[in-house]
Amino acid sequence: MIEEARGERSDAEAGPKGSGHGSEADEVTPKRGVLSKYLRAKVRHFLLTVTADRMTRGGLSRRHRAQNVETRELELRIPRWPTQFDGLRIAHISDFHVGHLMTSERAIDVVNTVRDLKPDLVACTGDVVDLGLECGVDGVLAALGAVGAPLGSLLVLGNHDHLDNGRKLVRMAKAAGVQTLVDESVTLTCGLRVGGIDWGKSIRECSTRVGRVWRGAGGVDLLLAHNPKAFVGAARLGVPLTLSGHTHGGQVSLRKRSNDISFRRRLRAGLYRRDDSILFVTVGLGAWFPLRVNCPPEVVVLTARSE
């Protein structure tokens, strides 16, 4: 089992094609101390990223940016997945961290790769930006909105998305045609019920948010959550499939991906199962430190199959 950790609350504002259920954007109260968190994050970034890169004369960032993005296609057998959505293809992307290590141009190239894969739905599970919004993220969101997936592009926010101005990011996404789910759900035109929760740090907070979405929608088929700890609450409620990011797979791994999908492992990367619920955690695309070992950035297209 996973140890529970205590955390803190978050803020944002709400915004493919379907009818929504849940909280409204202007009902969310901003966090206190956002500015101090932003400043602390900038200091960490300077010490751990900028300084480290300078010490290698830019070698770390050059090697990091030269790393290819892997494209993977996985077929998931999901016990509770509704049969009418058998074969649905979901492009799962996460953790762009647009900024110093991920330029907006590179991020847009990744989104264009997603477009060319022709998924039915695009699901982005947060941390679109690394620090501030003045990083060209508007172009990335515009590309996401223009993918042209039949069921649209959905987004949930991660912890980094809140460092500068989470509400503004949601407004920017909405203007670009990307729907952000903030503790709410949407029923897509095909009938699929998708829930999305805002950033939560602890299992307890994530579970509270998942429960709120579940009750508001009368159940969901697919849950998007930046923090994979949300899977604890999702599995208790019997959510068929949860998609998450956040961990970057640790960025440095001593071994390649495991095929073990048991719930005993830490929710760090790959597939997990608890009872009849499935979790997929992507290692994401960007980084907070310019080094990835055995954790190459990835775009994953998941084909959901009814078991």
Image (spheres, rainbow, N blue to C red):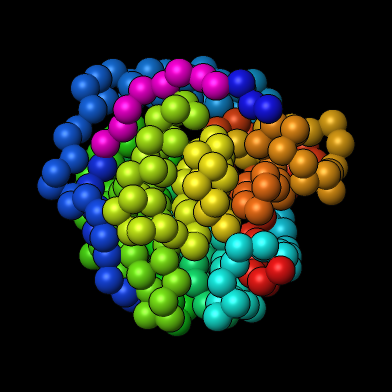
Residue 161 is left or right of residue 50, and the answer is left
Residue 40 is left or right of residue 263, and the answer is left
Q: Position of residue 244 (x, y in %)?
A: 55, 47
Q: Position of residue 230 (x, y in %)?
A: 50, 39
First to last magenta residue range: 4-11
**3 or 199, nearer to the observer:** 3
For the point 33% across and 59% down, the residue is 217
Q: Does residue 302 show up magenta in the picture?
A: no
Q: Does residue 10 show up magenta in the picture?
A: yes
Q: Is residue 98 above or below residue 254?
A: below
Residue 116 location, quadrant: bottom right
Q: Is residue 138 above or below residue 275?
A: below
For the point 60% across and 36% down, the residue is 247
Residue 1 location, quadrant: top right
For the point 44% across and 36% down, the residue is 207
> Does residue 18 appear anywhere in the picture?
yes
**254 or 208, nearer to the observer:** 208
> Does residue 106 appear anywhere in the picture?
no
For the point 18% across and 40% down, the residue is 28
Q: Position of residue 3 (x, y in %)?
A: 61, 21
Residue 177 is left or right of residue 242, and the answer is left
Pick out the residue farthest to the left: 26
Report the number of discs. 0
Rendered-image quadrant of the C terminus: bottom right
Q: Position of residue 81 (x, y in %)?
A: 59, 67
**200 or 288, nearer to the observer:** 200
Residue 143 location, quadrant: bottom left
Instruction: Please identify the dominant SS of the magenta region.
Output: loop
